[in-house]
Image: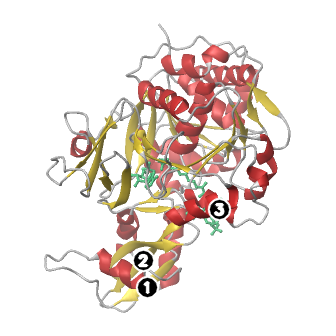
Amino acid sequence: MANLLHDSLLGKRADSDAVFLHLPDGGSVSYAKFAKRAAQFAQALSENNIAPGDRVAIQVGKSPDALALIFGCIQAGIIFLPLNTGYTGDELAYFVQNSGARLLVCDPEHIDTLRPIADKRGAEIASLGQTGTLTAQANAAGGVFKTEPRQGDDIAAFLYTSGTTGRSKGAMLTQNNLLSNALTLVDHWQFTSSDVLLHALPIFHTHGLFVATNVILAAGASMVFFPKLDPDALIDHMPKTTSLMGVPTFYTRLLDNPRFTQDVTANMRLFISGSAPLLAETHRSFEARTGHRILERYGMTETNMNTSNPYAGDRRAGTVGLPLPGVDVKVCGVDGDELPRGEIGVLEVRGPNVFKGYWQMPEKTAEELRPDGFFITGDLAVQEQDGYVTIVGRNKDLIISGGYNIYPKEIESLLDDQPGVLESAVIGVPHPEFGETPVAVLVAGPDGPPDIDAVQSAVSNSLARFKHPRRFITVEALPRNTMGKVQKNALRQEYGALFA
Ligand code: MLC
Ligand code: AMP
């Protein structure tokens, strides 16, 4: 029996000398070398008695080995949870606990601080990097590993995504969710083995991992693998590359760079944007500067990619294009009934890309995944007569900063527990660089106003940097409607120009 994802993405090129990764400083990693490295990690994991179906939590910096570890998990049938490197110990503890991870893999410099978190939850801990313990084991492994059979419906990964209420949920993504979407995107965006992608996204989210990496593997193409976004480095490499995938901040930062000219982009065939709304204005400025029309697409952690502007055809600024082949899309009223085209409602999607449910949260799954397979995205959208979809807002309390999701509820729960805070509301306001940024509005308790420095340090201790409110404002009372519900719209209006 086969391992669908491993065989399709890596196995079939396991002997190929073709380049998979170009390293920014000049080296490269071939498909054969990468496949062997993945097998070494699969072996190292097995030697640690991590079995198929077990979970491995991975919080490591971006590197070829980090990617090889993920593909080692796939080959060994182990479920991996890639985690944002910005998460604090508190956040990490939750993911290890909730997933029941058998192993936590971290950077060598964090192993001592994170060990108690793993110990307390009965997980082993290992590290990846030059002095890493798992790296040493992989180095000693022969690199021949009997691939674990896996079927399309088997879970490949948990991707944690927060909710508007309560804690993060582990979205269970199957092998077929990931593979079907990668194959669709290769076709839709016309990727071939000649493509060279600029890869500057993190590999712990859907965009950098399942869209960018899996598309490149499925096409047998290659990518320049940058540790993080550095617009100058992208510009340096662009004359020899063909494509870029980024969040809107990538495009605004490129436009801010005077070295970014039409000449630099002459060899590029495709610029793709997603994970957050791309302003129509950015789309137009980009075309004016380079002659390229950015291709915007729309997806989610739970669903991978759902819609995309066409490769050949009208890439319409401000829209997320048409449903991808095999994906059903409908715009519904709150009761779930489909609305006529042209009306605004909640977007629902169905297809082989849609996840299996939230790990050990059947009620949450039932709230968002209908029995007929439609997933309620929580995004507000309108679909034109000709099928183009525009995301016009959100029916969920979510802030997206530079492509990272921030759920106000998580920050508010922490703020409400701080001395001097009676209650709080966190809102997203427009930000020139990150699209949106969180602002905290606090109501003082009866004993006087809160000490903002103390509140800020509580936030720093518990939450990843990207979630920190950029402004704390103390008010007498929060605006409420007649039902007593906080009117965040009124707050957004009042503070909307803070970063203009
Ligand atoms: C970094 N910082 C951020 C931030 N990224 N703050 C808010 N929002 C962000 N997104 C913080 C840093 O910690 C730092 O804080 C300060 O901001 C400036 O750092 P920087 O060096 O300028 O940031 P940089 O490393 O360049 O990162 C910016 C970025 C990055 C936009 C390149 O955030 C990024 O790569 N975002 C992509 C996220 C992503 O992949 N999303 C896809 C999700 S999948 P300080 O105080 O230390 O200076 C998904 C589905 C789909 O949504 O459809 O794709
Ligand atoms: P995540 O949970 O990190 O996968 O984020 C998914 C959310 O990002 C979606 O529900 C949308 O709100 C948003 N999103 C992704 N792509 C786009 C896009 N092209 N335009 C607008 N919003 C987007």
Q: Which label number is shown at residue 192?
A: none
Query: Quarter-wise, where is residue 284 in the image?
Result: bottom right
Amino acid under disc 2:
Ala
* Secondary structure category for the residue under label 2: strand
Say if mark 1 contacts mark 3, CB within 8 Å. Answer: no
Amino acid under disc 1:
Ile
- In terms of sequence position, does the residue under pointer 2 or pointer 3 come before the other? 3
Label 2 CB sits under 8 Å from any ligand 1 atom: no
Work out whether residue 37 or residue 180 is closer to the camera in this orientation and state it.
180
Q: Residues within 10 Å of mark 2 (few under 14, many from 20)?
A: many
Rendered position, 411 above or below 60: below
Q: Which residue is mark 3?
A: 288
Rendered position, 285 above or below 74: below
State the CA–CA distance, disc 2 to disc 1: 6 Å
Q: Which label number is shown at residue 473?
A: 1
Say if mark 2 contacts mark 1, CB within 8 Å. Answer: yes
Q: Residues within 10 Å of mark 3 (few under 14, many from 20)?
A: few
- In terms of sequence position, does the residue under pointer 1 or pointer 3 come before the other? 3
Q: Is residue 399 left or right of residue 128?
A: left
| Residue 174 seen in the figure | yes
* Secondary structure category for the residue under label 1: strand
| Residue beneath the point at 53% across and 74% down | 457
| Residue beneath the point at 50% across and 57% down | 404
Q: Which residue is mark 2?
A: 440
Work out whether residue 477 or residue 307 is closer to the camera in this orientation and state it.
307
